[in-house]
Image (cartoon, helix red, strand yellow):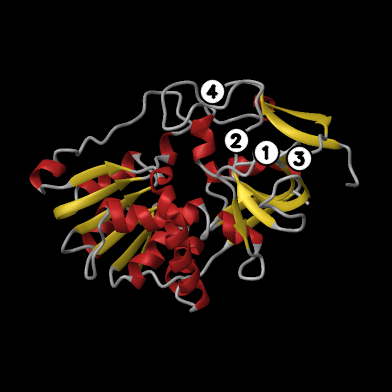
Amino acid sequence: MSTTVNRQFRLAARPVGLPKRNDWNLVEEPLREPGDGEFLVRIEYISLDPAMRGWMNEGKSYVPPVGIGEVMRAYAGGEVVASRHPKFAVGEHVAGTFGVQEYARSNGKGITRVDTKLAALPVYLGALGMPGMTAYFGLLDVGAAQSGDTVVVSGAAGAVGSIVGQIAKIKGCRAVGIAGGAEKCRWLVDELGFDVAIDYKGEDVKAALKRHCPQGINVYFDNVGGDILDAALTQLAMHARIVVCGAISQYNTTAPVKGPSNYLALLVCRARMQGMVVFDYAARYADAAHEVAGWIAQGKLKTREDIVDGFETFPDALLKLFSGENTGKLVLQVT
């Protein structure tokens, strides 16, 4: 190996509101060789995901928070550069929760071997990674989308939302995306094949949903929460399913989280609102990824990676998620 140093971003403080650069420390530590049953990965790409903001908070969640002084949790992909593990060879590419660092040692638990001849490594952090699995299981299992359904997805130009709408079309549904800005909306319709895109920055979402979903919303896939969730609740069809995947509008608020004021629509429409965490479907990832990879190969599903260069840019790159600057899957290129 050409380096003896590993750079890491370690959590320094619990953020209040939007994370700041000094909520992390950029540190260097000596690079350690893998022990017996371990391998060393040189990280090439780090996935930047809205969930990372929640992982920084103290309190009960679906995973423990990142501890102060710990390497910031993140999904990442890279190349095995040293191995004392019988099942992982030098030169192979892998993906897993390696953290925001340049190198990671692993015992192989929870790590996926990936084939960069089939798809570029960043795709395994997006459509063939956690966002793709979230879209697949959220829409088809939790949302129970069926041919003929009207599917509405918020955050539609993001990593998860852009895949949700495309799977909806593949399954014979009508896909309505909500995104910010005319350029993103054009991308959803012209490139990804959404039937309609609603620009929440330029039009009244409630009125647009009423106009574009005259028979009501059968599946609402929520990545945003707040006012847009409230607007969707006013236009539900009977027996609608609402998938609570995320609430990015609420992640950095310093006030109490804004809950849905129109929740009685669930009663009137006999609708169901259910949260989903992708880790619950880990045993089925391989089958789902195989199906998604087939759609990509057939040209039925398009991927887009928004790649930011430079390991040291991590704090600023992460904030692109919360300002809505990224289109598609946001990824940090390390090398």
Which residue of the protein is positioned furthest toward the left in this rendering?
268
Residue found at the very far right of the displayed protein: 2
Front-lying residue, 261 or 275: 275
Residue type for callout 1? Val
Mark found first going from the N terminus, 3 or 4: 4
Amino acid on which disc 3 is placed: Glu
Q: What residue is rendered at 38% in x and 66% in y?
A: 167
| N-terminal label among 2 and 4 | 4
Q: Earlier in the sequence, mark 3 or mark 2?
A: 2
Left/right placement of residue 112 relative to residue 83 reads left
The circle drawn on residue 179 is none
Quick one: which residue is furthest to the bottom in this view? 298
Q: Nearer the viewer, residue 239 or 73?
A: 73
For label 1, the crowd category at 10 Å Cα-Cα, with few meaning under 14, some 14 to 19 and many 20 or more, is many
Secondary structure, mark 2, is loop
Q: Amino acid at mark 4?
A: Val
Q: Nearer the viewer, mark 3 or mark 2?
A: 2
Contact between labelled residues 1 and 2, with CB atoms less than 8 Å apart: yes
Cα separation, mark 3 vs mark 2, equals: 16 Å
- Residue 104 location, quadrant: top right
Q: Is the residue 278 above or below the residue 257 in the image?
A: below
- Label disc, if present, on residue 73 of the rendered structure: 2
The residue labelled by disc 4 is 16
Q: Residue at position x 28%, y 51% from top?
A: 142
For label 3, the residue is 312
Secondary element under disc 1, as helix, strand or loop, is loop
**Residue 68's spot in the image, x, y percent?**
62, 20
- 242 and 42: which is toward the camera: 42
Mark 3 to mark 1: distance in Å?
10 Å
Q: Which residue is mark 1?
A: 100
Judged from the image, the secondary structure of the residue bearing numbered disc 3 is helix
Say which label, 4 or 1, has the lower sequence index: 4
